[in-house]
Image (cartoon, rainbow, N blue to C red):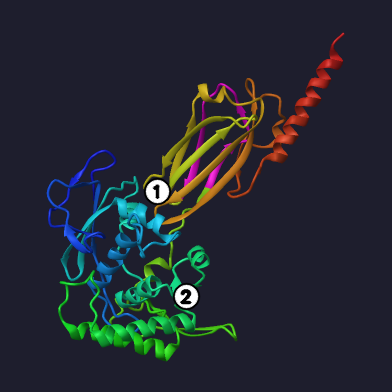
Amino acid sequence: METAGPNGKLDVPSDAIKWDHVQQKWIQVGSGVKSTSKVTFHLKFGNWHNGQPMDMNDVLYSTYFLYQWGAEPSKDSKTFDSEYSPKANQAAKILIGIRVIDKNTIEVYQDYWHFDEGEIADSAGVFPSMPWEVFYAMEKAVTDGKVAFSRSESVSKNVDWLSLLVPNDASIIKSNLEDFSKSNSVPVSLAGFTENTQYYSNRYLASISWIEKHDHAVISNGPFYLDNYSPEARIIIIKDFDDPTYPFGTGYWKKFEGVDVTKINRVDVPTIVSLGKELTIPISVTPGSTVYYYFLNADGNMVDSGIRQSDTGNMTTITLSKEKTSLLSMGANDLKIFAVSEHALKPDIFHTSFLGIQGENKTLPENLGSVYATSNVGSNYVVVGIVLVAIAIGVIIVAVKKRKKP
């Protein structure tokens, strides 16, 4: 992934291509074209569930489909859907062009930036979900006016909403594939990329055979496939895709089984804090964790917040300056801590309250215990009981002093 964003630009190779919906062909972007980001995909292809090898034509057709159905509609345009096309139009506008490097590698140039590079890569994704011939047959079914891609379009045109799972719709797809096979049809979007007529014939026949066998047209990739659907009995049968070309073998995802979730082990929070005095709070967390903390006063206003990184061990420290503690409230204040790890999205959360007082704490009896008490991680208001005791004692002391006055 390369990016010059948010303000810079990258040079786009002049031989990068994009689909021209007016000329109905791929054209080179030409010289002087810029993009914000460039993503290079090294694709791992296996077989489709119908047994046919995936290839770059599948990528090209799905990219063509985005350009074609995302184009501004002309008066007599048939490749427009009132729901899909406006969304596709936004994606097509930022897609500057693509460049096929070899049979497994493609570069995608787009005017898109995000502070998270993973978001940029995801937005440029080109991996197809269906074989190109199924897309081709679906497209013809819609442009022929037999079905529609979306619910709203099906209502406005008074046709069925296309579903590859429904036997009747699958039959329409099968019929189109049979017509393509008989006429040796080559989609205009793939013309010039593959000249082998046997290749196209194999693709059509494999998908036809799949529909005849399974009575649906859901053909995809992945470790499982849809074997059979019975709408009357409301039964769907899913089977594992036991194919040697599947690129992710047994155990490939094992590294994700033991997720390294961060944990807050200990937070030493004083039950009583003297306002205007520096406050230090040691925290024990999982090594490599990032700690976010927030101090809130009784009015719910933020007194201080920050980020701490645990050291090579498991410790980090929050320090609240005397200027900050002076902003705390007399009475109850809140501390919230979130610990996160780059290995897992789920944070560990700590929330507690403490009492703010003016001056040194000299009024509490010694038998109440240590001023510093360890709060339990994950519990809310662990020291509420202690705080209430402290408040009660304070009230008693004030009452006693009033009685002693003449």
Q: Amino acid at mark 1?
A: Gly
**Closest to the observer: 324 or 228?**
228
Residue 283 forms part of the magenta stretch: yes
Residue 171: image location, x then y, percent: 43, 84
Residue 200 shows in the view: yes
Residue drawn at point x = 19 percent, y = 62 percent: 26
Residue 345 image position (x, y, % from top left): 45, 55
Q: Residues within 10 Å of mark 1 (few under 14, many from 20)?
A: few
> Disc 2 or 1, which lies upstream in sequence?
2
Farthest residue to the top: give it: 406
**Span highlighted in magenta in the image:** 266-285
Local SS, label 2: loop
Could you tell whether 6 is left or right of 276 in the image?
left
- Asked if residue 254 lies in the magenta stretch, the reply is no
Q: Nearer the viewer, residue 27 or 307?
A: 27
Q: Is 301 drawn above or below residue 290 in the view shown?
A: above
Q: Amino acid at mark 2?
A: Ser
On the image, the x and y values in percent for residue 146 come to 44, 75
Please report the residue visible at 47 percent of the width from the left and 41 percent of the height from the top: 292
* Res 92 label: none
Q: Position of residue 81 (x, y in %)?
A: 42, 62
Give the residue pinned by disc 2.
163
The answer to whether residue 152 is above or below residue 11 is: below
> Horizontal placement of 139 versus 12: left or right?
right
Q: Residue visible at 17% across and 54% down? A: 29
Give the labeled residue for mark 1: 313
The foreground one among 271 and 340 is 340
Circles 2 and 1 in contact, beta carbons < 8 Å: no
- Horizontal placement of 1 versus 263: left or right? left
Distance (Cα) linking label 2 and label 1: 56 Å
